[in-house]
């Protein structure tokens, strides 16, 4: 079963708890007092969330949390400029690889999150807690949101403000946000920035940074840590950017 079938299956909300579990339960038609209580749980500890970044439901729960976060935060982001364009909808379907049979159900979750008066912050905070210490996974969620925001070829100032706030909640410094931002908005982004270093870095430091980023962002590693396989194309794109940046630096410095 695809991640989307699991999400709309009706039990995912109980596994997650918190705001994400509450909206999943509502979308699945299982609005019960326990899910509502989970939404009010400041520790996000009910039904599988321990408050310490672990998941009682194992790998499925991690993948459900990842995918639900992208859907819900995309819906919240769609509200900030007041327009949901066809390009954004098409990008949404492309990035998420939603099977035709699941589009209606995922669309219901998206519309419910978009129309809800709730702010986006509790959802981002729950994800930051659940994936605490998993920097590459959190960055994967941020990059998925960027793909949606840039689907029409431009980034609305309100969208950038939204994305920056999400990045802050995720624990990213401004320099980290700028690196992701430039990767999606600036053709020929600085390859040193993409490796998280400056031009005065040594060859050894650059080699080490490339090796570490390659390990952390390898699709198999990300999937093992909670990125759904449906997002593997996004992970491959990230690896391509890392390797392209390293190749450019290596040629400039004649590093062997």
Image (cartoon, grey):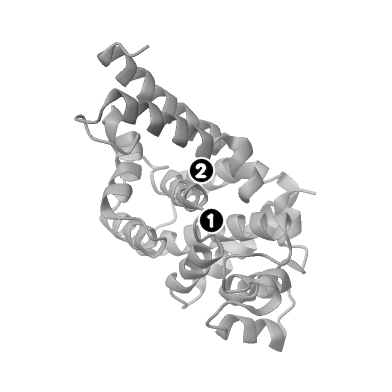
The picture places residue 157, in percent across and down from the top left corner, at 26, 55
**Image mark for residue 225:** none
Q: Which of marks 2 and 1 is in front?
A: 1
Would you say residue 28 is visible in this rendering?
Answer: no
Residue at 43% in and 24% down: 243
What distance separates the C-alpha of mark 2 from that of mark 1?
13 Å
Would you say residue 70 is visible in this rendering?
Answer: yes
First-in-chain label (2 vs 1):
1
Please identify the quarter of the rendering in which residue 77 is found. bottom left
The residue that label 2 is drawn on is 91
Callout 1 crowding tier (Cα within 10 Å): few <14, some 14–19, many ≥20: many
Q: Which of 166 and 256 is in front in this view?
A: 256
The picture places residue 106, in percent across and down from the top left corner, at 65, 57
Name the side, left or right, on which 92 lies relative to 172. Answer: right
Name the side, left or right, on which 54 lies relative to 159. Answer: right
Indicate the secondary structure of the residue bearing disc 2: helix
Residue at 49% in and 47% down: 136
Q: Nearer the viewer, residue 231 or 138?
A: 138
Residue at 49% in and 32% down: 214
**Image mark for residue 70:** 1
The picture places residue 91, in percent across and down from the top left corner, at 51, 43
Please identify the quarter of the rendering in which residue 187 is found. top left
Callout 2 crowding tier (Cα within 10 Å): few <14, some 14–19, many ≥20: some
Q: Are marks 2 and 1 in contact (CB under 8 Å)?
A: no
């Amino acid at each position: 079963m695809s991640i989307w079938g699991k999400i709309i299956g009706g039990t995912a909300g109980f596994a997650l708890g918190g705001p994400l579990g509450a909206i999943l339960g509502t979308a699945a038609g299982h609005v019960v007092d326990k899910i509502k209580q989970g939404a009010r749980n400041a520790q996000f500890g009910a039904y599988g969330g321990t408050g310490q970044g672990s998941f009682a439901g194992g790998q499925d729960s991690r993948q459900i949390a990842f995918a639900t976060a992208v859907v819900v935060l995309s819906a919240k982001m769609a509200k900030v400029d007041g327009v949901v364009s066809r390009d954004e909808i098409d990008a949404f379907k492309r990035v998420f690889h939603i099977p035709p049979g699941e589009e209606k159900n995922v669309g219901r979750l998206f519309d419910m999150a978009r129309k809800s008066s709730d702010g986006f912050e509790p959802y981002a905070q729950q994800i930051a807690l659940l994936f605490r210490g998993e920097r590459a996974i959190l960055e994967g969620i941020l990059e998925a949101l960027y793909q949606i925001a840039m689907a029409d070829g431009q980034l609305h100032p309100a969208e950038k403000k939204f994305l920056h706030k999400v990045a802050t909640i995720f624990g990213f410094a401004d320099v980290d946000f700028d690196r992701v931002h430039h990767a999606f908005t600036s053709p020929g982004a600085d390859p040193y920035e993409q490796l998280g270093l400056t031009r005065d870095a040594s060859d050894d430091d650059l080699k080490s940074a490339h090796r570490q980023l390659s390990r952390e962002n390898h699709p198999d590693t990300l999937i093992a840590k909670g990125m759904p396989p449906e997002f593997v194309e996004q992970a491959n794109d990230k690896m391509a950017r890392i390797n392209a940046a390293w190749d450019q630096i290596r040629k400039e410095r004649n590093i062997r």
